[in-house]
Amino acid sequence: MRRATSRRISALAAVALLVPLAAACGSDDKGAKDSGTAAEEKATGPLVIYSGRNEELIAPLLEKLEKATGTKVEIRYGDSAELAAQLLEEGDKTKADIFFSQDAGALGALAKAGRLDALPQGTLDQVDKEYRAEDGSWVGVSGRARVIAYNSDKVAKAPESVKDLTKPEWKGKVGYAPTNASFQAFVTGMRVLEGDDATRTWLKDFKANEPQVYEKNGAVLTAVNDGKAELGLINHYYWYEKAAEEGADKLKAALSFPKKGDPGALVNVAGAGVLKGNDQKAAAQKAVDFLLAEEAQTYFADETHEYPLAAGVTSKDELPKLDTLGVPEIDLSKLESLEVTLEMLREAGMV
């Protein structure tokens, strides 16, 4: 995990360094086409997708996507931040047509560099404005909510805010995964919402309250369920996956969705954007629309236990509706500034 974290930090640093250069390079698409780029050479080639989503999780869906678009699909899997850095480095010469990111921050980095085409309004309008780019450069396809898991045998009333986790009563009782991308996106969201100074103070106070460190969200949930931690910071779908496997009535862990506007109530998205300069525009657009259509949205609802964001699909899980959650008002594209978050986590001794 430490090696993975190091790669992620390096990738995010590369994103920060490459954005200005990529923005400059991406400002002259016509020039790139006139000079004969790789994009022209692959005009009749496969649709190339860079996927920050896990292969085991998403490969069956992308096989269906290939049939739906009628175009051969090639997929490069990797960490979203690393792929974003690679796309910025490749610039106009990239062979990628679509970036399918696990989180909005990596898409925001490409949008900031001007590397994504604007999507048609009809595509964007399938998703509520909170879960798509304000400039139309990317669209969310599935959502995941941050929650506070708690052991129902040991906790009578779970906290409604992550800010409560710094109180003495929770000292040594909270599990979290500081190297996990979702935790880091949550901290970035807090920075966007409340500023760097307030976030730095929260990190310092949280660390001083001696939280228990785990490598992954799944391990946090297991610790809460087994009573080794009384509370845990995770994404909602880990609980629903475990409930589907073991039975909800057998779990000691339960979920608390933080109160309205709390930074702990962040809903991040997996989303897609079309790379500028690609010559597979029709197939790329079909692919994005496929991800928003009923078949794919049902896949996210039933197989990954995420929130489907389009097509009127509802989850078979008893999820609270998205519009009833206390989601803070935030431009998800601004989650791209993860490198600052990682520096704060290093200062706090968390990574």
Image: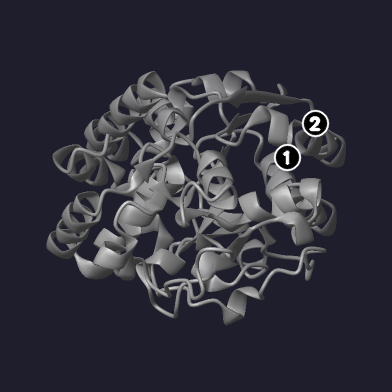
How many numbered tags mark residues here? 2
Q: Which residue does the image show at 29% across and 25% down from the upper left?
A: 10
First reached walking from the N terminus: tag 1 or tag 2: 2
Q: Residue furthest front?
A: 153
> Of residues 124 and 326, which is closer to you in this image?
326
Would you say 10 lies left or right of 51 here?
A: left
Q: Marks 2 and 1: in contact by CB < 8 Å?
A: yes
Asked if residue 351 can be seen in this view, the reply is: yes
- The amino acid beneath tag 2 is Thr
In terms of secondary structure, where does tag 2 sit? Answer: loop
Q: How far apart in space, not on screen, are marks 1 and 2 (Cα)?
A: 7 Å
> Of residues 318 and 128, which is closer to you in this image?
318
> Of residues 215 and 235, which is closer to you in this image?
215
- Residue placed under numbered mark 1 in the picture: 283
Q: Which residue does the image show at 58% across and 24% down from the upper left?
A: 40
Location of residue 51 by image quarter: top right
In the rendering, which numbered label is found on residue 182? none
Location of residue 346 by image quarter: top left
**Badge 1: how crowded within 10 Å, few (<14), some, or many (20+)?**
many
**Badge 2: how crowded within 10 Å, few (<14), some, or many (20+)?**
some
Residue 122, percent from left and from top: 67, 67
- The amino acid beneath tag 1 is Ala
Residue 184, percent from left and from top: 36, 46
> Of residues 279 and 60, which is closer to you in this image?
60
In terms of secondary structure, where does tag 1 sit? Answer: helix
- Residue placed under numbered mark 2 in the picture: 71
Residue 112, percent from left and from top: 34, 49
Would you say 246 lies left or right of 253 here?
A: right
Q: What scheme was used to colour the molecule?
A: one colour
Residue 20, percent from left and from top: 23, 38
Compared to 42, does 223 lie above or below? Answer: below
Q: Which residue does the image show at 38% across and 73% down from the upper left?
A: 262
